[in-house]
Amino acid sequence: MVSILKNPQLVLLNIEKIKSFKSNRRFLAADFNMDNWESLAPYIERLLNEEILSSNDFKEWLLKWSELEGVISEDVAWRYINMTIDTSNKSFAEKYSNFVENISPFLQKEGHKINEKIASCPFIDQENPAAFEVYKRGIITAIELFNEENIALKTKEQLLEKEYGEIAGKMSIEYDGKELTMPIAATYLKNTNRQIRQTVWETMSERRLNDAKKLDCLLSDMINLRHQIAINTGFKNYRDYKFRALNRFDYTPKDCFNFHKSCKEHVIPLVQPLLEYRKNKLELDTLKPWDLSIDIEGKKALKVYQKEDEFIEKGIACFNEIDPYFGECLNTMKELGYLDLFSRKNKAPGGYNYPLNEIGIPFIFMNAAGTVGDLTTLVHEGGHAIHSFITRSMPMVAYRSAPMEVSEVASMAMELISMDYWHHFFPNIIDLKRAKVYQLERVISVLPWIAQVDEFQHFLYENPKHSHIERKEYWDKLNKEYSSGLIDQNENKKYSPYTWQKQLHIFEVPFYYIEYGIAQLGAIGLWMQFKKDKNKGISNYKKMLSLGNTRTIPELYKAAELEFDFSSKSIRSLCQFVESEIQELLD
């Protein structure tokens, strides 16, 4: 039905053509804007009433629906982007809330009718089975999960998620006579003066603790809503509902439990020697939480950039050397003003790449503060952006968005592949090695955190009536199970029960986190290919990404010559490879 890019021959992007994207509309008027439900409803009504008398009619109808989906999703994207860019702007917040409260409920109801029309079309099985099967499966799942009572509940849920962003966006601390956003404050944790690190870490922890009760109550409200959504749809808990809603057909909760177990048994033992090495190099009797971000040899923190423009230009140069098309993608975003990279007051936390499905160009949002971690975030979100660019020519919007277990391979593999080109940021070979060690340490150390957050979420939703005290106790239990035993937390016990609150995924995108762990393994596999043969590694990376959402997860991994395998054996083998690469850099 659509042209899938098996071997993408990617061409440079014409900025002027991109800017005139609305002139390419075939179904909607060029001047159409989604101001309210009344402006949108006639188009959906036309689609619902249109007769489909042949396979060709069905194809044309799907393209009209896809065009409308693209326009809607881009409008919502800008509402969300603007709201996160400035959480203090009431106009941005109101515009997002207006969609959630006054457009989305109608859209969910009418969208269900659209799905039913697609599923019942007599020509549905005449479409390309390889490319269409995943889309059809998703449509059928959406129909099965639809419940009209849940529309109002999901509206409330989205408003609660917005509230989390507002609370987190307001967090800042006072230090050394300055007001610091949390990302900026975190840069002080790399300071060579241990007393400064401790003071800032404790000040940040106290600031988070001020909102701990509020965030606990907020999550409880979310859990109650989500549990009711699941019950209304016939599931016994929200976890089981969410697995189905996320189209997790290729693995089960049991596989996740095995991942948790494997991280405890095989990854934490690899983290322990890294922490021991850190303690010895820093000449410390004990490691404290504020000793984990400083350079492993106690050197002054690396600066990724001095000026903001420099960071962007170096990023483009890095991507350009990996593949000229990749550099052109990032440059196009810069030219369009679709890069908002730097931390400031009232900016929401975190980072993301948001596809804009009509214009076909994504938007990157992050909170850079000048650290090596900012480089990791840039190349991570840049990998997502490249994925968006590679699939932008697919006429069906639904085909462009790959499963998250694959989308995160696009980003996490770029973190590793790009390291060979970090000389643009670190021309000094010693600094370059330090940056690579930081990145590879993180590759291993983040896996237990991913497993811990995921295991925590299983507890939250399998036991929706748990108390705040039980929640606190369970997180403390996980802290012990996932601990290496080398970080002394004795002085900071009042903070540790609430460290989960800094993970926005728990609030805004429940159960979207295990994907990072699964994808990390795929990313390491692609990086191993790249190290053996750069051209093969990049080619397989593009092949995987170019298929978008037209294959199952195992098939998408196979396209990149990877196994979809997060078994104990795979985790142990891949992490040992990363550990050997770290040792080579440290020798």
Image: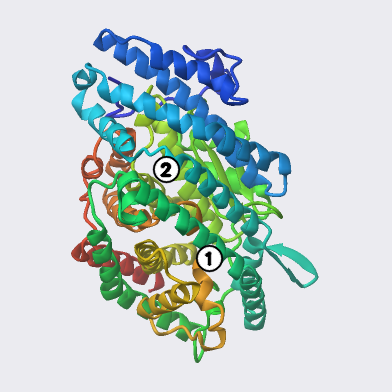
Q: Report how far apart the C-alphas of labels 2 and 1 lie in the structure.
A: 37 Å
- The correct choice, above or below, for 246 with respect to 25 in the image is below
State whether residue 134 is above or below residue 176. above
* Amino acid type assigned to the residue bearing label 2 in the image: Ile
Quick check: 427 left or right of 248? right
Q: Residue 494 or 113: which is nearer the viewer?
A: 113
Camera-near label (2 vs 1) is 1
Looking at the picture, how far across and down is residue 51, in whole percent?
33, 9
Q: Residue at x 30, y 46 (%)?
A: 244
**Is residue 356 in view from this perspective?**
no
Q: What's the residue at 25%, 8% (across, down)?
A: 54
Residue 360 appearing in the image: yes
The residue labelled by disc 2 is 322
Q: Count how many numbered circles sit on residues in the image.
A: 2
Instruction: Name the N-terminal-most of marks 2 and 1.
Output: 2
**Furthest residue toward bottom:** 285
Residue annotated with mark 1 = 501
Task: Please indicate whether residue 5 sits to the left or right of residue 322 in the image.
Answer: left
Q: Where is residue 450 in the image (x, y as percent from the top left)?
A: 39, 63
Q: Do the residues labelled 2 and 1 touch (CB within 8 Å)?
A: no
